[in-house]
Image: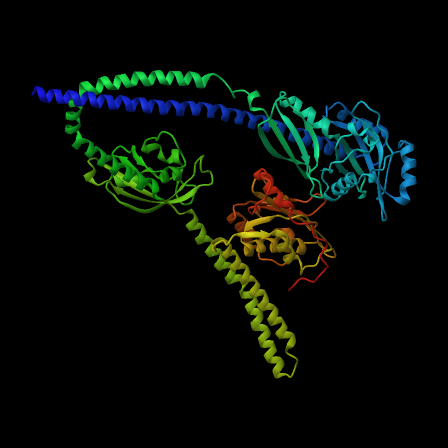
Amino acid sequence: MRITLALVRQRGRRTGTWLAAAVVVAGLAVTLLIQAAVRRSQHDNAERVMDQRAAMARAALVTETGRFSSLLAATAAGLATDPRLTWEDFDAATSPLGSASLIGASSLTYVVPATAAQVPAVQRLWRSRGSDGLLLRPAGHGAEHFFTIFARGLAEEPVRAGVDLSAAPEAASALADARRMSVPTVSDAYVLLRDRNLPAARQQHSFVFAAPIWPRTADPDFRGWLVLSVRGQDFLGGVLAAVSQGQLDGELRAQNSDGSRPVVARHPAPGRPDLERHALLEVADREWTLTVRADSRRLPGAHSGLPGAVLGGCLAITVMLAGLVYVLATGRERALARVHAATAGLRAAEAESRRQAALLGAVMTTIGDGVSVVDENGEHLLRNPAARELAGIEGDDPGPGDWQEHYGLFRPDGRTPFPLDEMPLLRALRGEPAHDVEMVVRNAARPEGILISVDGRPLDPAAGLRGAVAVFRDITELRRHENDLAVFAGVVAHDLKAPLTAVRGHCEAAAEALDDDNDPRPSLERVLRAVDRMAGMIDTLLAYTTARDAPLARVAVPLAGLVGEVVQDRSFGDLHVGPLPVVHADPGMLRHVLDNLIGNAVKYVRPGRAAQVEITATPAGPGWARIEVADRGIGIPDADKPAVFERFHRAPAAAGYAGTGLGLAICKRIVERHGGEIGVGDNPGGGTRFHFTLPLAEPEPAGERLDPAHAERAAMRSTRPRSLVPDRQPAE
């Protein structure tokens, strides 16, 4: 016995020594990991601070340029209301901008267009300061000049009017774009004309904002532009000085129309920068790139004495734990062995129970139907995630008497509250199985309401308690699909009957013509046209069905080429196609969207007028593009805009134009299946502007590592603008 006890004690000491050594090794490993984590946390903290400072700098630049654009547009809109503009009117309208603290702004000028023949007249009007009111007519044909008529200085330097901005191609291009698009634009970076006489060391890359002035009276002539000149170095330095607290080194690059990316301005900061961020800025109709750098040692939270303190504390705790483990291991080994043997069966049973419970939980979480179990008092014992999602209401569950009001349960008509005694769970508690009971769930979380089918069963007595179980299924889409099929059948029965009647009548007329030795060709041609109309309607109905159920075959689709194919056989009075990106989409379905939108722009024009269509694209967030199709047609009344994408909807304004009311519904289905959105609005100056979003295709690998958002937007400039397409007659 003593020998046995000695062997046990010896084994206990040996075991205690090994365990203590293991604790020391594990403690050292954990200590090193914690210290590394602390250092990594400090580095991550510096990265987060850098992200915050970069975001603040970007937000400040976006806010300031947005303020430039909005103030300029608002002032231009005010000047447009004055039919005969004088210096006093200009001075009164622009005086608030003089006190608006526009960072880097040097001057504000009123610019008018003129041909070479009009230059002497414009110069005489400028010298007179518009004492009788300045009223200019369009420039007409010939080389165009851009004269500053009125000027207001925004910096401490004199500004003179009478300058011809056509000497600066960058400014002239921005003015032309603003007049064409009817929105404020920004120019390429260049040295202002008034700064070109300065020494090279004092010259700055600058830019101008241009806002078009269109009259709001019966006079349709273009009035001119309101132009804001901004010096890049003063602008960047003023903004970063306010938000960076002297910790950010900034560089601002502009994206010129020729694809170059000149440095507009630099703002230095002390230290040796080791952190760098890039951000894109949307400035008017352009994109700029902001690069900020910082020395992580100068950022808050980058360095402290915490890693050393953590190292010392963890070592002390490791030594204490090793000693405690050694003491416990040597004194309790036999007791632990006996406890382990006695509880082995219990642990196995517990593990099996946990496995079964985990399996049941996984099954309940995985199934798509909602499952709910209640006890004999109607209190919920179990609800899987699908049941909670269908109910739409989270939080404490009320008693059965409040189910109807709490969950918003109604009969299938959506208005009659569902009676309490007919609810499937309560019927199952009474021992009455319920099959396929339909009800509408509409509450604050589901204001639109969904239609569900419920089966209720009494709980098996083998469970050891009395209760009921219910299974829920969402059948909203099933019923909606059934309604679509009913509407589809009605359209087919009604709209295909008329062409068939025409075919029959003209065939009979052709037979009679043959009997009378008359020419049957006119009747046969009418038969062919009726058959073509019927075939077109069948194609439209098939496209409507395909847009919902056909699988998507997504590839990289260059929009410029696809638009060229769609417009090549159509007749336009004026067509402008801007730079278009490469998107990730199904080319066949995307062609259907473009064909419908461009076809509507060509079709819905006033009698006697040619179609004017503009197709452009802009960024719509990281990885997405927004495509717009604008026209100068009959437009869509505001009351009809919410319903234009509904199936079989025809606006009253479209009376007299051929159509089935399915084209825009097909476009909506295709765009939403690609994950995008589609909408419609008014086109300034008359007409309609449709827009939809699509995901961009992945950009090609490049040698220079750029910000992902910048790479996606670079795809927007991968194609050049198309010229006007020659007029062609559309296919029947």
Q: Look at the image and tell me whether residue 649 can be seen.
A: no
Report which quarter residue 260 is drawn in: top right
Residue drawn 49% across the image and 17% down it: 304
The image position of residue 712, as x and y in percent, is 59, 42
Residue drawn 62% across the image and 71% down it: 526
- Quadrant placement of the N terminus: top left
Residue drawn 80% across the image and 22% down it: 156
Q: Is residue 258 above or below residue 34?
A: below
Q: How many marks?
A: 0
- Quadrant placement of the C terminus: bottom right
Colour mapping: rainbow
Q: Is residue 4 left or right of residue 459?
A: left
Report which quarter residue 679 is drawn in: top right
Residue drawn 52% across the image and 52% down it: 554
The image position of residue 133, as x and y in percent, is 87, 34
Q: Residue furthest left?
A: 1
Q: Nearer the viewer, residue 213 or 310?
A: 310
Q: Is residue 164 left or right of residue 529?
A: right
Q: Is residue 471 left or right of residue 104?
A: left
Q: Nearer the viewer, residue 11 or 368?
A: 11
Q: Look at the image and tell me whether residue 717 can be seen.
A: yes
Report which quarter residue 474 is drawn in: top left
The image position of residue 90, as x and y in percent, is 82, 30
Q: Nearer the viewer, residue 174 or 189?
A: 189
The image position of residue 644, as x and y in percent, is 58, 49
Q: Is residue 700 above or below residue 319?
A: below
